[in-house]
């Protein structure tokens, strides 16, 4: 039996496939709901046919991604700073030491990892540079 997480992922895949199915768009394959169900059941059958097991440990460990390499922030132990209530990894020191590439963002949000630079490619200060300066970073 597949766990809820795996079934949820399969449902997302089935939905995506049904939405991209030309036959559904043309009305030749019935309703979108029927197409989603067909794709979902097909994926379940593949799991059973090839005896694919999901992770039932319940630990929240994403075994499917266990081999994923650590993020840059984890690799360089970038300090976390707060600017206007948002936490950022501060990569300025790592950039200065050549630990990360020169074009790497100066800061990345902890939550979504959106990059922020203090200067543009032309060397002009960004709006974020003024914000960071006001915050005392």
Image (tube, rainbow, N blue to C red):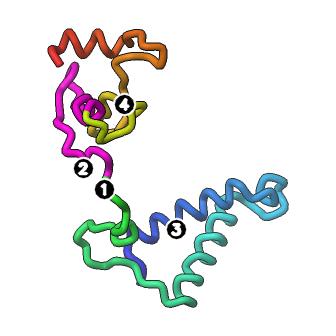
Disc 2 target residue: 74
* Residue at 42% over, 79% down: 2
**Residue 36 as seen in the image, left or right of residue 47:** right
The N terminus appears in which quarter of the rendering? bottom left
Q: CA distance from mark 1 to mark 3?
A: 26 Å
Question: Which structural element holds mark 4?
Answer: loop
Q: Classify residue 20 as left or right of residue 136.
A: right
* Residue 56 image offset from top left, x and y in percent: 31, 79
Q: Which residue is mark 1?
A: 70
* Mark 1 vs 2: CB contact within 8 A: yes
Q: Residues within 10 Å of mark 4 (few under 14, many from 20)?
A: many
The residue range painted magenta reads: 71-96
Residue 89 visible to the viewer: no
Spatial separation of the CA atoms under disc 4 and disc 3: 35 Å
Q: Which numbered disc, 3 or 2, marks the residue that appears first in the sequence?
A: 3
The spot of residue 94 in percent (x, y) is 25, 36
Residue found 30% across the figure and 30% down from its top: 107
Which residue: 62% across, 57% down? 16
* Residue identifier under label 4: 105
In primary-sequence order, the first of circles 4 and 1 is 1
- Give residue 33's position: percent from left, percent from top: 65, 61
Location of residue 29 (image quadrant) = bottom right
Q: Do callouts 3 and 2 mark residues in contact (Cβ within 8 Å)? A: no
Q: Quadrant of the C terminus?
A: top left
Query: Which badge, 4 or 3, comes first in the chain's sequence?
Result: 3
Distance, label 1 to label 2, CA atoms, is 6 Å
Could you classify mark 1 by the number of other residues whose Cα lies within 10 Å: few (under 14), some (14-19), or many (20 or more)?
Answer: few
């Amino acid at each position: 039996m597949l766990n809820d997480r795996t079934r949820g992922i399969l449902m997302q895949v089935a939905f995506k496939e049904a939405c991209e199915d030309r036959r559904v768009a043309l009305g030749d394959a019935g309703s979108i709901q029927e197409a989603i169900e067909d794709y979902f059941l097909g994926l379940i059958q593949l799991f059973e046919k090839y005896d694919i097991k999901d992770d039932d440990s319940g630990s929240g460990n994403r075994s499917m991604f266990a081999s994923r390499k650590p993020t840059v922030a984890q690799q360089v132990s970038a300090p976390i700073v707060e600017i206007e209530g948002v936490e950022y990894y501060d990569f300025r020191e790592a950039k200065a030491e050549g630990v990360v590439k020169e074009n790497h963002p100066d800061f990345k949000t902890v939550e979504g990892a959106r990059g922020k630079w203090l200067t543009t490619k032309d060397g002009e200060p960004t709006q974020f540079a003024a914000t960071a300066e006001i915050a005392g970073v």
